[in-house]
Amino acid sequence: MPPPIPILLLKTKSTPEDGYADFFSARGYTPTFVPVLEHRVHEPNLGKVRALLAARAFTDVTRNIPIRGSERRKFGGLIFTSQRAVEAFAGMLEAEEGKGEDEEISIPLYTVGPATARSLGALSTNYLPQTSIHGAETGNGENLAYYILDHYNAVYPDIFTRPPILFLVGEQRRDIIPKLLMESEETPPEKRIVVEEMVVYETGVKEGFESVFGEVVSSVGTGDGDGEAGKEKKKPIWVVVFSPTGCEAMLRVLGLGPFTATASSERDVFVATIGPTTRDHLRQHFGFEPHVCAAKPSPEGVGAAIEEFMAQRG
């Protein structure tokens, strides 16, 4: 049996289980997690969300429950496309538990993938039992936007009473969902939906990531002193990138893209991206073409792209 291929996953390992660890361990890879992102909640904006909750601004307009206080805008739905946004919102709800909220939120929650949907499911069970979760199988922002156009228009068919949707985001995000819902020529005016974005978390490169990543790259798959170290050093490495954040440090360590002059390893290193956002960032900012881009942002999607590439390479 051939030795396992190292695969470096530039993310924090999920607990208690991680789908990427399970998937790749079962398919002849040795997964290693290297956290690259550091997330900080945006307290001022979470305070605004808290005020909206207190003003019943998330009440389903079809229930005709009046808004109180100074807030005059209702939202008929919430959009989440990252687990970090769910975590920030859930942390706020947890802090508010038992403080006298007297109106249940009963609006649809939209999400882009199964992982975020699972996080929303736990949130819904604990805090928002009247909400419903939609879009888990859409897979990307574009598909989710089209799904929302159909579903939300069915919930609120009257353009004159259709409330806006609140999109809880990080400061780094694509604008494809707001554009398709509000501005796209493909979207008939009578189906357009107003989207208000609110940043609830900020993301930066984790302190010390570059040095930690460099140490991991130098150490993985280099043998265990049994005489096979020379062969192991030539074993290829796969690096899976989940976000534009940290891409420059990653390329610098690997000696790829604009940093090829610094390359010191003789082993093959291949880069896979979780989706088109990170792929396009590498192209546009560093002139680097990743070896594969997953068609779906999932362990199966990444695995299929890697296996196809390796099969073609022979």
Image (cartoon, rainbow, N blue to C red):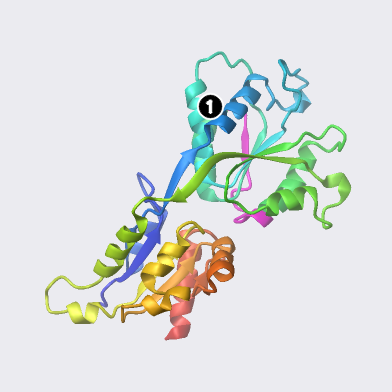
Boundaries of the magenta span? 129-142
In the rendered structure, does residue 1 fall within the stretch colored magenta?
no
Q: Residue furthest left?
A: 226
Q: Main secondary structure of the magenta part?
A: loop
- State the residue in front, 95 or 147: 95
Using residue 187 as the reference point, say whether residue 295 is left or right of it.
Answer: left
Q: Position of residue 117 (x, y in %)?
A: 54, 44
x 74%, y 44%: residue: 151
x 86%, y 36%: residue: 158
Give the image quarter of residue 197.
Answer: top right
Give the image quarter of residue 276.
Answer: bottom right
Locate the N terminus by quadrant: bottom left
Q: Which residue is mark 1?
A: 127
In the rendered structure, does residue 139 fall within the stretch colored magenta?
yes
Q: Position of residue 55 (x, y in %)?
A: 67, 20
Q: Position of residue 190 (x, y in %)?
A: 88, 45
Locate the C terminus by quadrant: bottom left
Tell me the kind of residue under disc 1. Answer: Tyr
Residue 23 appears in the rendering? no
Q: Residue furthest bottom?
A: 314
Q: Is residue 153 above or below residue 105?
A: below
Using residue 232 as the reference point, say whether residue 300 is left or right of it.
Answer: right
Identify the secondary structure beneath mark 1: helix
Residue 288 appears in the rendering? yes
- State the residue in front, 205 or 237: 205
